[in-house]
Amino acid sequence: MIQLELAGENGLILYLPAEISAKNLNQLEQLQQQIRLLLGEQLQELLPSYASLLIVLKPAHQGVLAIKALLEQQLTLSATVSEQQGQLVILPVYYHNAWDLDLVATQAGLSTAQVIELHQAMEYRIYAIGFAPGFAYLSELDARLATPRLKSPRAKVPKGAVAIADRQTAVYPAESPGGWNILGLCPTPLFKPEQAGTAETLMPFAVGDRVRFQSVNLQEFLALGGQLPQELC
């Protein structure tokens, strides 16, 4: 069931059932295609999340109420939703026990090697991008790795930190505060604002893409452009 609500004079927000699921992701991708065709040049931007889609209109549109009525009348969901897979993005990780790798292993009753193996074994779908540019929220971890957020968030999480919280995993694209459990570091830049306005993309992935993590050693991490934070130097 599709629900549309106003989001200011130049926006609408579309809601699907509030759940984190591949079905929602595929339906949102299907709806985005329809909206682009229906609105054409009136559309400025589409911003998807787990179960919602923000529709941002250009200032010179025909009127937000008229567009809302059009979308309510024309948007449809197929009885069977195609399993769109998106591109596969491989993110290298230098796993290290300087942060929370040992903690995650202890809480899960696993060795650190098993934690690393399980973290790499999954193929994750990107459900949303938010919190910070380039911060991708990925589909669920193996249940054995489910770990609560830290009771006291860190004031400074290093750029490229690969972390988990509950049953999600993500990579911090820049240094920032954070309460997720850090397993290691990724050398791949996830947000490149210097490429704005060029043919290059700002991020190496988009909502709907797939991500796999691949373990690398310190030499490989440095060769790929990774930089160690001060506490590891």
Image (tube, grey):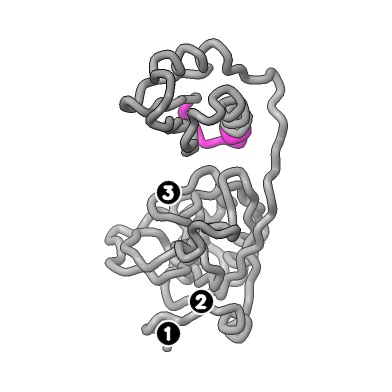
**Quick check: can you spot residue 78?**
yes
Whole-percent x, y for residue 212 in the image: 65, 59
- Residue 96: image tag: 2
Chain-order first, disc 2 or disc 1 = 2
Membership of 24 in magenta stretch: yes
SS state under label 2: loop
In the image, is residue 79 above or below residue 82? above
**Quadrant of the image for the C terminus?**
bottom left
Q: Is residue 77 above or below residue 184?
A: above
Which is closer to the viewer, label 1 or label 3? Answer: 3
Q: Is residue 139 above or below residue 36?
A: below
Q: Which mark is residue 109?
A: none
Q: Is residue 106 visible?
A: no
Where 15 sits versus 233, above or below? Answer: above
Q: Quadrant of residue 4?
A: top left
Q: Which residues are magenta?
A: 17-26
- Amino acid type, mark 2: His
Query: What SS does tag 3 mark?
Result: loop
For badge 1, the amino acid type reads: Leu
43 drawn magenta: no
Query: Rounded to the nearest whole Å, what is the CA distance between mark 1 and mark 3?
Result: 28 Å
Residue carrying label 1:
232
Per the image, the residue denoted by label 3 is 130
Please report the residue visible at 59 percent of the width from the left and 60 percent of the height from the top.
Answer: 200
Secondary structure of the residue carrying numbered label 1: helix
